[in-house]
Image: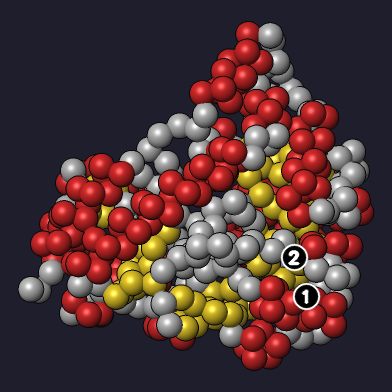
Amino acid sequence: MSSPRWQDAARATGLLAPDGRVAATIFAEMSALAARTGAINLGQGFPDVDGPDYVKAAAITAIREGRNQYPPGDGIPELRRAIADHQARHYGLAVDPDAEVLVTTGATEAIAASLLALVGPGDEVITLEPFYDSHAAGIAMAGATHVRVPLVPDGSTFRLDLDALRAAASPRTRMILVNSPHNPTGTVLTRAELEAVAQVARERDAVVLTDEVYEHLVFDGVAHVPVATLPGMAERTLTVSSSGKTFSFTGWKIGWVHGPAHLITAVRTVKQFLTYTSGAPFQPAIAQALADDDTPRALASSLASRRDLLLEGLETAGFGVSVPAGTYFVVADGGPLGFADGADLCRRLPELAGVVAVPVSAFCAAGSPTADAFRSRIRFTFVKREEVLREAATRLARLSPS
């Protein structure tokens, strides 16, 4: 008898222990280690301050006005209109808020529901590697085959291996799952890289599912290019984003997916049997927030300065660093400090420096060439207050051999 899908998903994310039990994620392990040791937790990517007060006030008003029961399964009309208006304003995309937008319980549900709706046994789903853990889990739960294409070091950043992408595509390729800006590396895929993805998708008649939750968190004049804006791609692309990263309300879990009506109908059919709906008083608050372009710009500017502060601290400590063009994560290489195994370094880091990070190998398939290539690298988040990052940099300086 084949193993249950939950076991496949647990194996895909490295959670199934040898005795068959589901083990804790590396993120939970590192967060528990930070709590136990008093180390500064730069492993888990969540802000340590809330988003704008006016958005919180809008949610409180909605609660007081009685917007506390089930909202429509596809999301309240004003939020769906706000999402469509946002896409038109920022990217020139014409999106029908009634037929082509679905509000979800965070981006994670949008991705899971899309995978469960559109792929299954016998299908292949291509992702980047390293990959966000829920991507692998969703592919496994759908019963599809996970095909991985590596990001490779290129100077101070990472780039998509285009030859590997073309070689990975096959007649069984049903979907390409793209994450840009990319967690964990901070890479923002270039238009040329995305055009290569689009070409493969058209050749294989595949759907592109694109995780764009960090769309506004880009730096140094780098542009985020939604796949749906490329020629011929709007009709085969599902675009996922979220209010959590853009407005620093990660616990509200208000995400969305938009795309062609027939694909959204398929995703909605699955989503109605997952959460059905959620976040009643938060949805009108996020609808207001999406009309505000100043908050995302201010957050990106603030994050750029905090990124540079952490980069300086890591370089002073002796790490090799990659400069992220987006997200709020930095990848650092412990190799120059004599640490060949990033997972081992992360478990020792609280004692050595009073800081917690996560190994990049946790975002790779166990034993894969990419996992080996990233073995010495670890990920830090800089979505913390400046004083926290300064203290972390001071502590990390203890590692410096000089």
Q: Residue at x 51, y 38 (%)?
A: 248
Mark 1 and mark 2 residues within 8 Å of each other at the beta carbon: yes
Kind of residue indicated by mark 1: Ala
The answer to which image quadrant residue 285 occupies is top right
Q: Residue at x 18, y 76 (%)?
A: 337
| SS state under label 2 | helix
Pinpoint residue 143: horizontal percent, then vertical percent. Answer: 69, 66
Instruction: Give the mark nearer the N terminus: 1 vs 2.
Output: 1
Kind of residue indicated by mark 2: Val
Q: Which of 348 and 236 lies nearest the eye of the viewer? A: 236
Q: Residue at x 70, y 15 (%)?
A: 67
| SS state under label 1 | helix
The answer to which image quadrant residue 49 occupies is top left
- Left or right position of 269 against 350: right
Residue 198 shows which numbered tag? 1
Pinpoint residue 212: horizontal percent, then vertical percent. Answer: 64, 56
Q: Residue at x 45, y 65 (%)?
A: 324
Q: Which of 227 and 107 lies nearest the eye of the viewer? A: 227
In whole angstroms, how far apart are the C-alphas of marks 1 and 2?
7 Å
Q: Residue furthest left?
A: 402
Pinpoint residue 265: horizontal percent, then vertical percent. Answer: 88, 48
Which of the image's four quarters has the N terminus?
A: bottom right
| Classed neighbour count for the residue bearing mark 2: other residues with Cα under 10 Å, few (<14), some (14–19), many (≥20) | many
Query: Is residue 158 placed above or below 279 in the rendered structure?
Result: below
- Left or right position of 348 against 109: left
Residue 227 shows which numbered tag? 2
Query: Is residue 280 placed above or below 349 in the rendered structure?
Result: above
